[in-house]
Amino acid sequence: MFHGGPGFARIAAVAVAGASCLAVAACGGISASSLSTAASSAQDPLASLTASKVATEAMANLKAASSLTMAGTVNESGKNIVLNLGFKLGHGCAGTFREGSEGSFKLIMIGKTIYFDPDTQFWKSQGGSAASAAIALVNGRYIKTSTSASGMSSIASLCDLSEQMASGKAAGAFTKGKFTTLAGTRVLRIVNPKEGVLYVTDTSKPEIAEIVETKNTGDGIGKLTFSVGAPVTLTAPPASQVLNGSAVGM
């Protein structure tokens, strides 16, 4: 639906690769929203635009946002990824990931510094025989490392949404669907019968509110909800809650 943009496969692959790299490096050897239809006679600011034009403008506005949040579930190659991230473009991101039954982790990236806090289940699923040692050493703290450290490029790429969307463009046989409401906001359904549905705010400056991929055409399936322009604050955890990555070979 969005070629070269924030596709499901790209997000899922980056998330999984980043999680695995972090786990291996840290082991160092330790190796929705509810939708309801809404009838409205309000004037439609998107009436003069084709479905493709609306989708293209919404993508451009997503790229130009200084901050946004993205949350949802992505299923790619049998991996179920649940993510909730806030992006401050050009600065970093913060949020959480859960990879099915394999555990979850918190992530904060500010500039070139990464803070990574996996839960116990994550260590058990990724740490192998050294999982118990890793859990005891880290003791619930964030691991502090750099985007230039070995294995960190995937996480750096994930948090750089502008990089992910650099070549993104709306593509497909779009048609306009019915209006509905999403989290209290009036949105227009933009339908691609071969891939899924794009929900765009019914405003003169259309913004992507949600992407629902129902057909796996290489981008996976799932749903991502966006809040374009939502304020995002990136704050490093207190020093008492941080373990330097060098202590675990990062």
Image (cartoon, grey):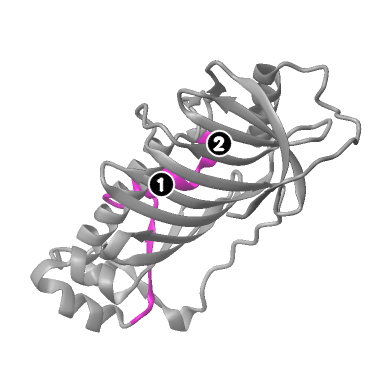
Segment tinted magenta in the rendering: 140-163
Contact check, label 1 and label 2, Cβ < 8 Å: no
Q: Position of residue 199 (x, y in %)?
A: 64, 37
Residue at numbered disc 2: 162
Q: Residues within 10 Å of mark 1 (few under 14, many from 20)?
A: many
Is 212 on the left-hand or right-hand side of 48? left
Dot 2 falls on a residue whose secondary structure is helix
Please give the residue where the numbered disc 1 appears in the rendered image.
74
Amino acid type shown at disc 2: Ser
The residue under the point 8% across, 71% down is 129
Can residue 209 be seen in the rendering of this structure? yes
Examine the image and state in which quarter residue 245 appears: bottom left
Q: Percent from the top left, x then y, of residue 80?
A: 34, 52
Q: Secondary structure at mark 1?
A: strand
Q: Amino acid at mark 1?
A: Val
Quadrant (top left/top right/bottom left/bottom right) for the C terminus: bottom left
Q: Does the image show residue 116?
A: no
**Residue 93 image offset from top left, x and y in percent:** 53, 54
Of callouts 1 and 2, the N-terminal one: 1
